[in-house]
Image (spheres, rainbow, N blue to C red):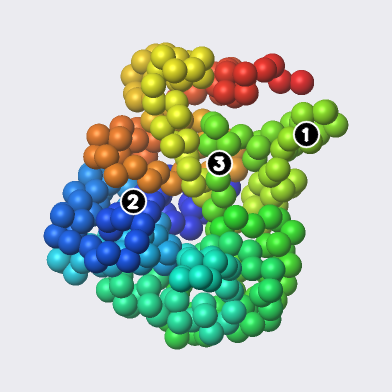
Amino acid sequence: MTESAHVTGGRVLYGCMGLGGGWDTTPYGPQDIAQAEAVVETALDAGITSFDHADIYRYGKSEAVFGEVLSQASGLRDRITLQTKCGIRLPEGDRPGLYDLRGPTIVRRVEESLARLRTDVLDVLLLHRPDPLADPAEIAGALATLHRQGLVRRFGVSNMSATQIAHLQSYLDVPLTVDQLEMSLHRRDWVEEGVLVNTPAAAGVGFPAGTTEYCVAQGIELQAWGALAGGRFADPEATPAGRLVSRLAERAGTTPETVLLWWLQKHPAGIVPVIGTTRPERIRACRDAVTRAPGLSHEEWYELWTAARGTPLP
């Protein structure tokens, strides 16, 4: 996939799941709005102009504090790409959490997200998780309604396999343009599912076979959530892989965070990492992944992979 094919228009997305206070229904306060303002400003300074949400993040408060920022910053909405997700319902009382991609639910959740975000249109809507009870024809009707009403420009999915995407697409008049999956130097099964074919190690790989190739062939943007691996490689002394990340960063004149993102970006699928840290210094540390082409050699990419695996490739 070429750079021009990127649906979200950037090489890195900022994931807003850390904004809005706690994971509960306690109202957000001025300090949460101030944090969101600082994070958005830092991301923009780093060249990041695409922001990823979900209606469940912080029980809707992540979208709401971002909406506060949009309402106070004239012209900001026109400078950014805004993406959110729906399809998960958090636990409520004695009811456990569940997935819900019924047509009316999708439409209602989008309307609620638009209200919280204080915007008239979403650039991208993702279906957050597969719902085994969903009627694909009903989903198609909901997406068609949202598109016809001008509430959503483009659509995609999250955490879906190639087979699930192809099945859903067969019902839709609008194209699915994004698949967001967990992909990082720590979660490597997206690449190992192909390389480990016909080896005993393949039994431990859970990534759906052929999904990466299918998305490339269909022009579907692959977005990588958890791209920084939750800080797993931040301590250069903690693991051999962390030490290698640090050495390669020093060699390239950049940061360990950038090296981790470069490892994803170097793959020819055109992967777009999603970073979720709320620490301004870590956001700034990702700048070179936005402004520079991946500065890893073929050999260095494999060195990182092998170090993270802890065992040689078959």
Amino acid at circle 2? Gly
Q: Nearer the viewer, residue 58 or 148?
A: 58
Image spot of residue 259 (x, y percent) = 43, 27
Q: Nearer the viewer, residue 201 or 150?
A: 201
- In terms of secondary structure, where does tag 1 sit? helix
Indicate whether 69 appears above or below 190: below
Image spot of residue 47 (x, y percent) = 29, 45
- In terms of secondary structure, where does tag 3 sit? loop
Q: Nearer the viewer, residue 152 or 18?
A: 18
Residue tagged 3: 183
- In terms of secondary structure, where does tag 2 sit? helix
Residue tagged 2: 18
Q: Quadrant of residue 233?
A: top left
The mark nearer the N terminus, 3 or 1, is 3
Gap in Å between the C-alphas at discs 3 and 1?
17 Å
242 displayed left or right of 165: left
Gap in Å between the C-alphas at discs 2 and 3?
19 Å
Amino acid at circle 1? Ala
View extreme (front): residue: 94
Gap in Å between the C-alphas at discs 2 and 1?
34 Å
**The C terminus, quarter of image:** top right
Q: Quadrant of residue 22?
A: bottom left
57 displayed left or right of 70: right
Q: Residue at x 66, y 75 (%)?
A: 134
Image spot of residue 235 (x, y percent) = 39, 21
Image spot of residue 164 (x, y percent) = 71, 62
The mark nearer the N terminus, 2 or 3, is 2
Residue tagged 1: 202
Mark 1 Cα within 10 Å, few/some/many (few <14, many 20+)?
A: some
Q: Is residue 47 visible?
A: no
227 displayed left or right of 313: left
